[in-house]
Image: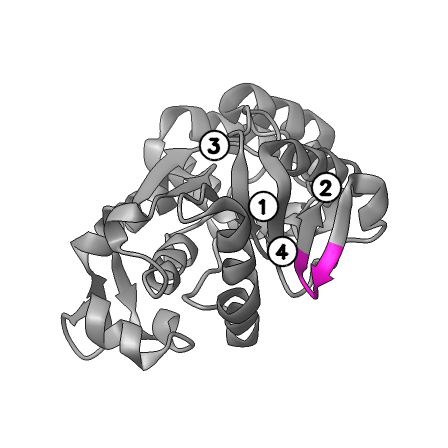
Amino acid sequence: MLGSYETFKESILELTNIDLNSYKERQMKRRIDSLITKHGISSYTNYVEILRTKIEFYNEFINHITINVSEFYRNPEQWKVLESEIIPFLLDIFGNKLKIWSAACSTGDEPYSLVMLLSKFMPLSDIKVLATDIDKLVLEKARIGIYHQKSLKGLPLEYINKYFVQLDDKTYKISDDIKACVELKQHDLLKDPYPADCSLIVCRNVLIYFTDEAKTRIYNGFRQALMKNGVLFVGSTEQMLHANKLGFVSLKSFFYIKQ
């Protein structure tokens, strides 16, 4: 036995400001226990002390508990709907000065995908995407902009040819012109203020790890962050139940409009 998980959660909140109570406990505890076991650490108490004193362990822990599975154009059929229906809808309402927020952006695959898609509708000089994540390490990876070919498997070839340089047989570097359109910032969805007057918020395949209470808080935050008729784009496992009660109307599968 590793000891009291409740006490461990309190220590992690004090140390990192991350509230593990907002995450589904069985999934999160399994992830943490596997990490502790990997290092042969005997208890939660010992692990917390190591996290306090060894930055490499601290960084590994943060990177492990924050969910960082990402790829360009994940679920391509949904990006086709975004291109053919949602972006034209938003341009009709808001013009080409769209304020777009990619929340929990991980290594940048999603906000960079948004920029490439928007480049079909307007010049890069008019495109600005705010991209946020709780994890400093993945934001740094996004700033570097080097990706394994597996991350690009769903991306249309036209974008790869236009906006990437192949470094070797397995890695690609994204264009500085695309990176310049994205502002990367650290942000905690459960604690930090949300941006205002957004036209589009993209937050995909993240909320499944939160408790229902935490999800409701985040959805309420998204609603307040959106302008009227703004759109929330969620992941393929995150259909919003009782959207009307949260102030949204389903526009298409995985796309919700603020009432």
> On the image, numbered disc 3 is attached to which residue?
187
Q: Earlier in the sequence, mark 3 or mark 2?
A: 3
For this rendering, which residue is in front, 167 or 39? 167
Residue 234 tag number = 4
Q: CA distance from mark 3 to mark 2?
A: 16 Å
How packed mark 1 is, by other alpha carbons closer than 10 Å (few <14, some 14-19, many 20 or more), is: some
Determine the secondary structure under disc 1. helix
Q: Are marks 3 and 2 in contact (CB under 8 Å)?
A: no
Q: Earlier in the sequence, mark 2 or mark 1?
A: 1
Given this view, does label 4 or label 3 mark the residue nearer the observer?
4
Q: Are marks 1 and 4 in contact (CB under 8 Å)?
A: no
> On the image, numbered disc 2 is attached to which residue?
215
Q: CA distance from mark 4 to mark 2?
A: 12 Å
**Span of residues in magenta:** 250-255
Q: What percent of the width, then of the height, locates residue 243?
A: 80, 49
Q: CA distance from mark 1 to mark 4?
A: 26 Å
Determine the secondary structure under disc 4. strand
Determine the secondary structure under disc 2. helix
Q: Earlier in the sequence, mark 3 or mark 1?
A: 1
